[in-house]
Amino acid sequence: MAAYAIVQVDVKDDEEYAKYAALAGPAVAKYGGEFLARGGDVDVMEGTTRARCVLIRFADMDTAKSFYHGAEYQEALAFGLPASERDYKFVEGV
């Protein structure tokens, strides 16, 4: 069953976050992830959000977690976490 990464981001340092993005994309691809949304306009109907929203589909929850904890993505996070405020979660599909 597919799993989805739902990520909401406020970038604080564009230059450092670009380093994160350069590493994160290939890490997603290595684990078979597919970007379904990556930035773009956001219209909030209820509640709140952050400036940038990302949606990534993975084959299943185990693959999603392997991606997140993998060396490639952890290297990316070394740049991304200090340069942003984020909410990052995985949700299992139906």
Image (cartoon, helix red, strand yellow):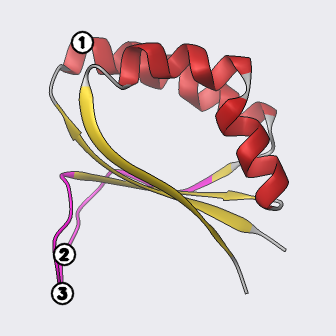
Q: Residues within 10 Å of mark 2 (few under 14, many from 20)?
A: few
Q: Residue at x 23, y 67 (%)?
A: 42
Q: Amino acid at mark 1?
A: Glu
**Other residues around mark 3 within 10 Å, as few (<14) / some (14–19) / many (≥20):** few
Residue drawn 29% across and 12% down? 16
Q: Looking at the picture, does residue 62 appear above or below residue 91?
A: above
Number of residues whose C-alpha sits closer than 10 Å to that of mark 1, classed few (under 14), some (14–19) or many (20 or more): few
Real-space CA distance between mark 3 and mark 2, rounded to the nearest whole angstrom: 6 Å
Residue type marked 2: Asp
The part of the image, by quadrant, that contains residue 78 is top left
In the image, the segment drawn in magenta is 35-51
| Kind of residue at badge 3 | Met
Kindly report the secondary structure that dominates the magenta region of the rendered protein.
loop
Q: Circle 3 — which element?
A: loop
Q: Residue at position x 69%, y 32% from top?
A: 69
Q: Name which residue lies at 73% across and 26% down.
A: 70
Q: Is residue 29 magenta?
A: no
Q: Earlier in the sequence, mark 1 or mark 3?
A: 1
Q: Tell whether label 2 touches label 3 (CB within 8 Å).
A: yes
Q: Which residue is mark 3?
A: 45
Label 2 residue SS: loop
Q: Which residue is mark 2?
A: 43
Of the 4 image quadrants, the one containing the N terminus is bottom right
The residue singled out by tag 1 in the image is 15
Q: Position of residue 28 (x, y in %)?
A: 67, 37
Occupied quadrant, residue 91: bottom right
